[in-house]
Amino acid sequence: MAKEIPDLVAEARAGTGKGAARQARREGKVPGIVYGDGKDPVAVAFDFNKLLTQLRAGRFMSTLWNLKVEGQDDVRVICRGVQRDVVKDLPIHIDFMRLRRTSKVNLFIPVEFVNQEKCPGLKKGGTLVTVRAEVELIVTAGDIPDHITVDLEGLEVGATIHISDVKLPAGVKPTIDRDFVIANIAAPSALRSEGDDEGTEAEAATAE
């Protein structure tokens, strides 16, 4: 299933340059520019409070947005820069780059675990320890997966799940070359405690 692309609402901004940008800020807006894809740059403005909320939610720079401007066709964009006030650390200008459906982009995609009921390790009291709830992947702008799936069927206590164990959608690959860990099946706490106790007793006996 393709990932739903969140909307980002803006309004067209008349004029460019410092004067027009200052006027937008006086009106409670954050001025911005949209460029790329072989088209002329377009000056836009965003509601300050709404934009600040989205910025503080995290992952803003790595999220593909569906930019909506009244009177214009929707366009897919990714943020390429946020200029902030040096004192207040609040946004005062923002840049977006247009993307084609065939463009490649780095995005964080959620990880979904399935078949917990068929996992022997969990049935024995083990715990699923998630190392990465999201994975940064190189995806195509026109076909972003909603999630990647990790199948837990047949996994025992002590099993470690690497990115190489996950079947990624066609055309998708990790941004990191190494075979990193996504999750593991940890031993039940009782067994871990017993192991710690045995280790302590062995150390004591050695000391004697």
Image (cartoon, helix red, strand yellow):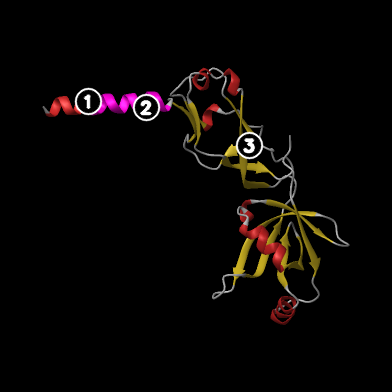
Q: The residue tagged with tag 2: helix, strand or loop?
A: helix
Q: Could you say where residue 190 lies in the image, as x and y percent from the top left?
A: 39, 25
Circle 1 is placed at which residue position?
Answer: 201
Q: Which residues are magenta?
A: 189-200
Amino acid type, residue under disc 1 in the picture: Glu
| N-term-proximal mark, 1 vs 2 | 2
Between the C-alphas of marks 3 and 1, the distance is 50 Å
Residue furthest to the left: 208
- Disc number at residue 95? none
Q: Answer whether residue 193 is magenta in the image.
A: yes
Circle 2 is placed at which residue position?
Answer: 192
Residue displayed at 47% across by 24% down = 126
Q: The residue tagged with tag 1: helix, strand or loop?
A: helix
Give the quadrant of residue 195.
top left
- Disc number at residue 172? 3
Q: Residues within 10 Å of mark 2 (few under 14, many from 20)?
A: few
Amino acid type, residue under disc 2 in the picture: Arg
